């Protein structure tokens, strides 16, 4: 069971994430969109959506700082454990609370505004459940485990385990005895990662990072040359 | 100078009868799908009126188009790149469905399934967006024909701009229809606003399209376009816009809206322009100078230098020829009777309008004067300030001069042709008074009044352009020298260019001795040389002969 959770599931989810994204890119670029519902309703969205998205961005940055950057590097930079702990606790709770509040408002909006609700698919609902659960658990971990119960230093257990995954040396012993909330949060996070490319979340991968660097006007040729060019595989005209 | 060709449209507003045929046929062709119920690529609005979406011209509210920043450079009015990315999660400048209208249908079934009773059953409206019952309160042309009266029409942003004292007067004086499609701008701000780079302008004909595979639904283009001619398909989550019926114009057919126009008032043709001067012209500081600046971007296809440059820049000869015959070129550049819609948005729109003289004529006739007389008409154009300043707000950023000039030309034409029709000698002075010649008058009359199909639509096909490209005036050697079949046999890999193939075939034949082995000819046979007798070598694949037993 432990092997399954801490050594197999991570890789399965990464394979699904990468494979699913490639599949979407090759076969479903048309379906790759934010599916924005701003046209239907603006007032709630105006507050909820930035709250959720910016909260989430900081949550992700926090995960990078906590999981990817080893503890040693931080102390080498002169960040003491107590300082890190305080920052992660307060900034993390704030970002997490913003994301949770934003998501709660978005879900409320989705449920109560007729047009938005009728544009909601089953896929969306599953995604909201998973996203909501992992956000709530994450917030609980930060507030309960790190705040109320005193600090739990995940940077000596979850952090090294996470990095070990990338070195292809998952050390499941590190994950033994981690608090239950952490375990649930991690597992749901991995399930969400696996489903990521198959839900509307994929729009995050379309983040327009190239926009600031391109000229305002885009010219494109109707075809990329006269008809003697090679046709796309499978699209050759019958000759 | 970088010569580019643009397919453009001119609409002669005097002839529009507001029948909405263009809108309906366009909708049948392009937006009859779910998700686009509220979308009209072509819509016809009554002016004065609020338009569709409601009050879209109020750029203080919607912030479409471009503005000049402090250094005098172009910047989208809704903000630069950083601001756009920061507001990507919620865009307050995007109209919501209520600003267009909530599309609906009726539950017709209740008409036949209602139980017998004292009351007539009614079909009640249902929203096509949420499926719930709804009250119909607005539509794409709710204020059609000034329906709703002064209360609605007074909310027209253009009326608000004209001076207070003329406001209440206008509805007695005039009304006209304004059909609108996407302007296929030379400097499109929808494109500038698109974070994914999915909106592009085609190099060949200047049509502005949304790549449906690259659009990610950021809906910034809706804000960017000052004419609100990009729409968000709420089912697919992608932006859609007028396509200038590119599948039709590519083969030389007019767009659906033009083809079906009852008033036959639309003209399609090619304009040549200098792509290097577009930004400079759009940066002209004075709003009212933008019209002239835009004219300055166009190139004269009669000029041999322009034609040489066009060939250098890859504009096919057929397109240059079409530009010389182009009715759009004639109306915009030669007669200068067509004006751009809202040049002050600085997008360099490419759908042009001949402002309507009929409000003036009607007003004049209403007073009992001779409405065909040039003197009377000229006087009326001067005194009827309201229609002129209204039209000036639409077509020349508020400067009455260009609109007056066009109206005077149309008035002169009217009176000049009346003389001719009544058998009087044509009076060249009437033409000269508006800076034209008698021949100009005849040509303009032919174009505007006779408006023959093949003179209204001069559309070069893409096939002509491609045929020119296939001639391969440039030597292809070095690009794919020699036949290199792909890994899966002869038919795989990239097909050879026709010229390369025939070059090799010819060389083989000339240098390969009397008889080329069929196997070396890649199975090609010249059937023209075949007299039907026997079997020419190479007709069938070469097969090594098996020796039969008993032979030898
Ligand atoms: S009119 Fe058409 S090309 Fe111009 S900005 Fe709007 S959508 Fe873009
Ligand atoms: S079809 Fe022609 S006449 Fe009728 S509304 Fe459209 S543009 Fe006007």
Image: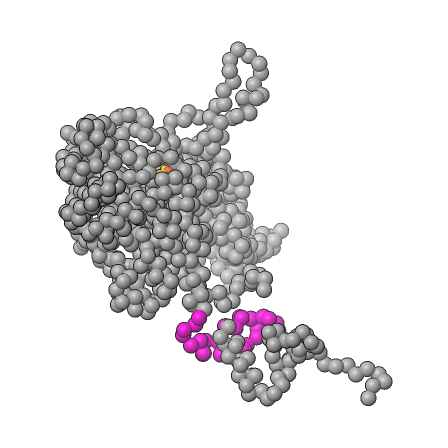
Between B95 and A227, the one nearer to me in the picture: A227
Q: Position of residue B9 (x, y in %)?
A: 33, 49
Q: State left or right for residue B328 relative to residue B196.
A: left
Magenta stretch: residue B483 in it? yes
Lateral position of residue B493 relative to residue A140, left or right: right
**Residue beneath the point at 25% across and 54% down:** B333
Is B174 placed above or below B266 here?
A: above
Quadrant for the N terminus of chain B in the image: bottom left
- Assess whether residue A180 is covered by the magenta stretch: no
Name the residue nearer the viewer: B484 or B221.
Answer: B484
Residue at image coords 41%, 38%: B21
Residue B110 percent across, percent down from the top left:
54, 22
Image quarter where the C terminus of chain B lies is bottom right
Q: Quadrant of residue B543?
A: bottom right
Q: Is residue A179 visible?
A: no
Looking at the picture, how far across and down is residue B84, in whole percent? 32, 49
Q: How many marks?
A: 0
Q: Residue at x 82, y 82 (%)?
A: B548
Q: Main secondary structure of the magenta part?
A: loop
Q: Quadrant of residue B460?
A: bottom left
Q: Which residues are magenta?
A: B471-497
Is residue A227 among the parts visible in the rendering?
yes
**Residue under the point 52% across and 59% down:** A165
């Amino acid at each position: 069971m432990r092997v399954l959770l801490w050594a197999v599931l991570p890789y399965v989810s990464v394979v699904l994430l990468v494979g699913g994204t490639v599949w979407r890119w090759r076969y479903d670029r048309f379906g790759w969109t934010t599916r924005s519902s701003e046209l239907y309703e603006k007032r709630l969205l105006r507050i909820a959506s930035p709250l959720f998205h910016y909260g989430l961005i900081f949550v992700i940055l926090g995960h990078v700082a906590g999981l990817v950057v080893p503890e040693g590097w931080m102390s080498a930079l002169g960040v003491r454990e107590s300082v890190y702990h305080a920052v992660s606790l307060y900034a993390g709770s704030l970002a997490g609370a913003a994301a949770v509040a934003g998501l709660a408002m978005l879900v409320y909006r989705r449920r109560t505004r007729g047009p938005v609700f009728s544009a909601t698919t089953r896929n969306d609902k599953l995604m909201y459940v998973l996203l909501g659960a992992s956000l709530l658990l994450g917030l609980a971990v930060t507030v309960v485990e790190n705040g109320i119960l005193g600090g739990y230093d995940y940077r000596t257990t979850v952090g090294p385990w996470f990095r070990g995954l990338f070195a292809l040396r998952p050390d499941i012993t590190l994950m033994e005895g981690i608090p239950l909330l952490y375990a649930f949060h991690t597992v749901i996070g991995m399930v969400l990662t696996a489903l990521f490319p198959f839900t509307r979340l994929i729009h995050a991968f379309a983040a327009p990072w190239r926009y600031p660097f391109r000229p305002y006007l885009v010219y494109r040729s109707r075809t990329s040359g006269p008809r003697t060019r090679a046709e796309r595989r499978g699209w050759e005209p019958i000759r | 100078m970088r010569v580019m060709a643009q397919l453009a449209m001119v609409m002669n507003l005097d002839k529009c009868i507001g029948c909405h045929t263009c809108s309906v046929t366009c909708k049948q062709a392009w937006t009859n799908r779910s998700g686009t119920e509220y979308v009209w690529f072509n819509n016809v609005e009554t002016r004065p009126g609020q338009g569709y979406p409601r009050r879209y011209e109020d750029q203080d509210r919607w912030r479409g188009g471009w503005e000049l920043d402090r250094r005098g450079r172009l910047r989208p009015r809704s903000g630069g790149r950083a601001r756009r990315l920061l507001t990507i999660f919620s865009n307050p400048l995007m109209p919501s469905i209520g600003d267009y209208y909530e599309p609906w249908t009726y539950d017709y079934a209740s008409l036949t399934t209602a139980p017998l009773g004292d009351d007539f059953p009614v079909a009640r409206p249902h929203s096509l967006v949420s499926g719930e019952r709804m009250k119909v309160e607005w539509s794409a042309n709710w204020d059609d024909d000034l329906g709703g009266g002064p209360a609605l029409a007074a909310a027209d942003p253009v009326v608000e701009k004209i001076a207070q004292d003329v406001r209440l007067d206008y509805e007695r004086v005039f009304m006209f229809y304004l059909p609108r499609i996407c302007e296929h701008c030379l400097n499109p701000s929808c494109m500038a606003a698109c974070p994914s780079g999915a909106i592009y302008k085609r190099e060949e004909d200047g049509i502005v399209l949304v790549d449906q595979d690259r659009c990610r639904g950021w809906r910034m283009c809706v804000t960017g376009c000052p004419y609100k001619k990009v729409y968000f398909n709420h089912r697919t989550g992608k932006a859609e816009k007028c396509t200038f019926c590119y599948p039709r114009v590519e083969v030389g057919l007019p767009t659906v809206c033009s083809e079906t126009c009852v008033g036959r008032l639309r003209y399609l043709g090619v304009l040549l322009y200098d792509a290097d001067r577009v930004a400079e012209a759009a940066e002209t500081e004075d709003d009212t100078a933008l019209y002239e600046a835009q004219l300055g971007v166009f190139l004269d296809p009669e000029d041999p230098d322009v034609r040489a440059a066009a060939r250098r820049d890859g504009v096919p000869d057929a397109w240059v020829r079409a530009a010389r015959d182009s009715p759009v070129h004639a109306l915009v550049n030669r007669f200068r009777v067509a004006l751009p819609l809202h040049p002050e948005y600085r997008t360099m729109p490419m759908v042009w309008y001949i402002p309507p003289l009929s409000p003036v004529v009607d007003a004049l006739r209403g007073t009992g004067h001779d409405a065909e007389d040039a003197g009377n008409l000229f006087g009326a154009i001067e005194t009827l300030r309201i229609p002129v300043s209204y039209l000036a707000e639409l077509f020349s950023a508020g400067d009455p001069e260009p609109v007056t000039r066009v109206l005077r030309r149309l008035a002169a034409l009217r009176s000049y042709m009346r003389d001719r029709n009544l058998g009087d000698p044509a009076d060249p002075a009437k033409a000269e008074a508006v800076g034209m010649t008698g021949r100009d008058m005849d040509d303009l009359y032919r174009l505007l009044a006779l408006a023959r199909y093949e003179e209204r639509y001069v559309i070069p096909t893409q096939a002509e352009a491609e045929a020119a490209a296939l001639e391969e005036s440039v030597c292809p050697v070095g690009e794919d020298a020699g036949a290199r079949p792909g890994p899966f046999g002869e038919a795989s890999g990239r097909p050879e260019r026709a010229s390369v193939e025939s070059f090799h075939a010819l060389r083989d034949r000339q240098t390969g001795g009397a008889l080329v082995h069929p196997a070396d000819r890649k199975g090609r046979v010249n059937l023209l040389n075949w007299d039907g007798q026997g079997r020419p070598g190479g007709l069938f694949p070469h097969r090594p002969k098996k020796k039969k037993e008993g032979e030898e």
